[in-house]
Image (spheres, rainbow, N blue to C red):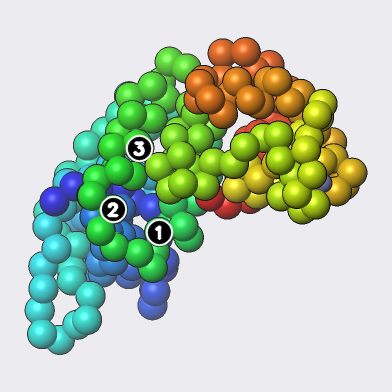
């Protein structure tokens, strides 16, 4: 079985509950502390075997193999990856039956994470997630007052569009967002705007 580690809880002294995003659900597993174990970190893609026994409600995490990406050793890229992938845990922990969408999306991101700006990749992936979930809103309609937005669009968590005055935050150019939402490409978005979008993304999927 394969998946991405999206959350780690330390329990007792050194034991861990490891939450792994697999193709169709987040699988929670238990790992006893042991010196022979390979080191695992949040964000790693791993191959593993869940080992069930009658004494415990959680399967043990066994035979872990890190399916490494070259950027796993790049501190800055890894930190951004961990921030991004951690969001999937809160978003998906109660759900099942995703049919591969989220792991495919993370595979797509992971392949690009080495060469491109990770924040751009994450934003493009997030737009694709919102569209997949039917939550990508028309950036010309304010979700707070239901009025038409003409020039500047402020975004709330979930990239919900609003008038800057309704949301009390600065906005981005409306035409830029129309294009971004439609194309799901950050090609025409500058670095300051990327920071704006990244911050909203970190509020939660
Ligand atoms: Zn409004």
In the image, 67: left or right of 147? left
- Image marks 2 and 3: residues in contact by CB distance under 8 Å: no
Of labels 2 and 3, the one closer to you: 2
Look at the numbered disc 3 and give the secondary structure of its residue.
helix
Residue 129, disc: none
Closer-to-camera residue (136/193): 136
The residue sitting at 84% across, 36% down in the picture is 170
* Mark 3 nearby-residue class (10 Å; few <14, some 14–19, many ≥20): many
Residue 98, disc: 2
Give how far apart the Cα atoms at labels 2 and 3 are.
Answer: 13 Å
For marks 2 and 3, the one nearer the N-term is 2
Closer-to-camera residue (148/16): 148
Residue 106, disc: 3
Displayed quadrant of residue 62 = bottom left
For marks 2 and 1, the one nearer the N-term is 1
In the image, 38: left or right of 54? right
């Amino acid at each position: 079985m394969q998946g991405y580690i999206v959350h780690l809880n330390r329990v007792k002294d050194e034991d861990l509950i490891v939450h792994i995003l697999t193709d169709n659900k987040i699988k929670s597993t238990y790992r006893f502390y042991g010196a022979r174990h390979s080191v695992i970190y949040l964000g790693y893609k791993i191959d593993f075997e869940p080992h069930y026994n009658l004494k415990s409600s959680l399967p043990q995490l066994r035979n872990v193999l890190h399916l490494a990406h070259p950027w796993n050793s790049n501190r800055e890229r890894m930190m951004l990856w961990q921030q991004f992938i951690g969001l999937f845990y809160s978003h998906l922990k109660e759900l099942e039956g995703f049919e591969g969408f989220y792991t495919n999306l993370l595979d797509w991101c992971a392949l690009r994470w080495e060469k491109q700006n990770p924040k751009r990749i994450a934003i493009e992936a997030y737009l694709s997630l919102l569209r997949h979930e039917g939550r990508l809103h028309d950036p010309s309609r304010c979700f707070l007052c239901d009025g038409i937005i003409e020039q500047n669009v402020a975004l709330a968590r979930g990239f919900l569009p609003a008038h800057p005055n309704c949301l009390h935050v600065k906005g981005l150019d409306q035409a830029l967002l129309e294009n971004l939402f439609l194309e799901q490409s950050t090609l025409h978005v500058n670095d300051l705007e990327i920071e704006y979008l990244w911050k909203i993304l970190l509020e939660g999927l």
